[in-house]
Amino acid sequence: MSAAIPFDTLAFVRELESAGVPSAQAEAQAKALSSVLQKVEDSRLQEVATKGDVLRLERDIKELEANLKRDIKELELRMVIKLGAMFLAAFGLLRLWPIPVQYVPPAPSAQEMRLPAVPPAPPVVSPSPR
């Protein structure tokens, strides 16, 4: 990758030489500075690429989440419809074939309250003719 930071090595070398730095040393410094700037730019590009990947992944995750919510809602509605159909079918069958119901009185319990027995009526005595 080429450096996006504009750096004129020739102008840098000439500036150093005019300040009294030997030509070989000025060229070495220009090369070193160019190399450092290139590494900085590469790492910055890598960081931007990583952020782009993260943003793309976040967008994909949100899209998948929306699809999943939609699918779950659709499944819930289908289940409600099927459950309602089963209830209607069950009640329809009960109306066609009612279940016979037989009344069974409860067994008498030990604590059942009973009315006292009516004593027998006294014998009727007819008056005797005297």
Image (tube, grey):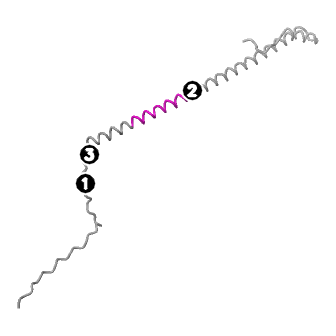
- State the image quarter where residue 48 is shown: top right
Residue furthest toward the bottom? 130
Q: Secondary structure at mark 3?
A: loop
The residue where tag 2 is placed is 63
Q: Going by the image, does 129 lie left or right of 8?
A: left
User: Compared with residue 26, is residue 110 higher up or lower down, i.e. above or below?
Assistant: below
Magenta residue span: 64-83
Residue 120's disc number:
none
Three-letter residue code for mark 3: Ile
From what the image shows, is residue 124 above or below residue 63?
Answer: below
Residue position for label 1? 103
Q: Nearer the viewer, residue 40 or 29?
A: 40
Residue labelled with disc 3? 99
Q: Are marks 2 and 3 in contact (CB under 8 Å)?
A: no
User: Which quarter of the rendered picture does the N terminus lie within?
Assistant: top right
Q: Position of residue 109 (x, y in %)?
A: 28, 63
Queried whether the magenta region covers residue 78, the answer comes back as yes
Task: Say which element carries label 1.
Answer: loop
Q: Quadrant of residue 65?
A: top right
Of helix, strand and loop, which mostly describes the magenta segment?
A: helix
- Label 1 vs label 3: CA separation? 13 Å
Q: Which residue is found at the position 73% from the left and 17% from the top?
A: 42
Residue 3: x percent and y percent?
76, 13
Dot 3 alpha-carbon crowd within 10 angstroms: few under 14, some 14 to 19, many 20 or more: few
* CA–CA distance in space, label 2 to label 3: 53 Å
Q: Compute the Cα span from label 1 to label 2.
A: 62 Å
Is disc 2 surrounded by few (<14), some (14 to 19) or many (20+) residues within 10 Å?
few
Residue appearing at x 55%, y 29% in the figure? 66
Q: Are marks 1 and 2 in contact (CB under 8 Å)?
A: no
Mark toward the viewer: 2 or 3: 3
Amino acid on which the number 1 mark rests in the picture: Tyr
User: Which amino acid type is marked by label 2?
Assistant: Glu
